[in-house]
Amino acid sequence: MKDRILSAILIVTTVAGCSDVNSQKKRTSEEKRLTATSYFSGFDLAHDTYNAISAASDGKIYYVLSSQPYNVAGQIHVYDPQADTTRFLADLTEICGEKDKKVIAQGKSHVRFYESGGKLYFSTHVGYYEMIDGMERLPVTAPDGYGLYTGGHFLAYDLGTGKFEDLGLAPHGEGVLTMTMDTVRKQIYAITWPKGYFVHYDVNSGEMKDLGLVSANGENGKIGEDYRVLCRSIFVDPRDGLVYYSTAEGDIMCYDPEGGTIEKLEDVDLRLDYFGSYDPTGAGSMGYNWRAIVWYPKEEVAYGVHGNSGYLFKFDPKKRNVEIVERITSEPSRKSGMYDQFSYGYLGFDLGNDRETLYYLTGGPIYEDGKRVKGKDKISMGAARGLENLHLITYHIPTGQYIDHGPVFYEDGSRPTYVNSIALDKDGNVYTLARFEHEGKLVEDLVKIPDPFEK
């Protein structure tokens, strides 16, 4: 059993107010607080991870811990809620068949796990970068004694046998930044990094299609010219299998797997005043892209969140309509009227077990002596402008009920930071990957937040 760092405590005080969700009483943000449990999985090089955590049908939580060094791969682990233990499963470079090739490591996974036919499907990404023109880029100069990155791999893990399978390599030596899967038709769709090629992989036939660049020269372009931040979330309409993604310009793109074509939807876009005003050729935000988006079966629409502004919206692919729903930033953020410190927005966004409540891990301002702690006004690279609190938000779609369950802290009072992932177990506990200190060293590892509706 791995070391458990902190014990879980849920501190809840209720005030008057009704809820249609599990009879939870609404409370003010000042009276609420969630205390999380952090787990050290045994990898002391674990670095910031995006997505890369999911619950599977076996009740366990699967996650990838990322790595930055060129010669150290990311690691796959699994957490068993019943036994309350974590277990190492595999080294990414090894399962990609590159253990002895001495090439830049498969440093991380940037995508969730998708389950189909008893297997979990996911992909790999590069974790080691080269600074070129002041930006983190895919290395073009290999470290001494090593070859360049070979490209991201599409992988499968058999839940029954515990065996991994290498399905294929992404084109052009790029990592896999964004991925989704049509789990019924067994089709995988992805966007690579840094240039941004759209890839279609057919699990049934093993065929890999390269559909070309999705947006100018992607994140390999020159800022102010052909640079475009790439979409981090794709969804499939299960009714017809069509695939949708966004661009920094605010266009909504549709891929038809049958025809093999990509089209821009001409009568709808994301260039909404509520989202703000952006230069698509600039860095430091997601532009007009949606940050995260999920399919909502009961209405047959997709619900998404715009990163920088924190607005929840719904997109109807048939009607080709985008409608603003609510601002689902934290309660302190809503009151301040300001953007959060993480300018890209947050990837910890998903439907809960009831399939009608959205769960969202987002930022909240820190106040000292009654004043909001301000970060940098503008950044040229990355997304974090300053320190913030982590808040857990739920939004019940049928009733429109928004609840900020309060800031999340570890037992010692420190804050989970760099949170961009989410998963829920069968009991409603929330999991993510966040930074915390272990034996004097900062790592990013598994964090468990108790069910916010637990009485």
Image (tube, rainbow, N blue to C red):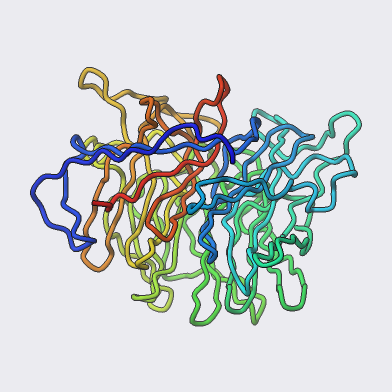
**Residue 247 left/right relative to 336:** right
Taking depth in this image into account, of 391 and 222 the one nearest to the observer is 391
Q: Tell me which residue sits at (70%, 61%) in the image.
A: 162
The part of the image, by quadrant, that contains residue 18 is bottom left
Q: What percent of the width, then of the height, locates residue 110?
A: 61, 49
Q: Tell me which residue sits at (36%, 54%) in the image.
A: 359
**Residue 99 left/right relative to 26:** right
Relative vertical location of residue 218 with respect to residue 442 in this rendering, above or below: below
Q: Tell me which residue sits at (60%, 38%) in the image.
A: 41
Q: What percent of the width, then of the height, locates residue 293?
A: 45, 60
Residue 276 shows up from this direction: no
Q: How many marks?
A: 0
Taking depth in this image into account, of 140 and 455 the one nearest to the observer is 455
Rendered-image quadrant of the N terminus: top right
Taking depth in this image into account, of 416 and 123 the one nearest to the observer is 416
The part of the image, by quadrant, that contains residue 222 is top right
Q: What percent of the width, then of the height, locates residue 228?
A: 58, 47
The part of the image, by quadrant, that contains residue 117 is bottom right
Q: Tell me which residue sits at (40%, 26%) in the image.
A: 414
Taking depth in this image into account, of 26 and 214 the one nearest to the observer is 26
Q: What percent of the width, then of the height, locates residue 276?
A: 36, 46
Residue 445 shows up from this direction: yes
Relative vertical location of residue 334 with respect to residue 414 in this rendering, above or below: below
Question: Can you name the residue that lies furthest to the left here?
Answer: 16
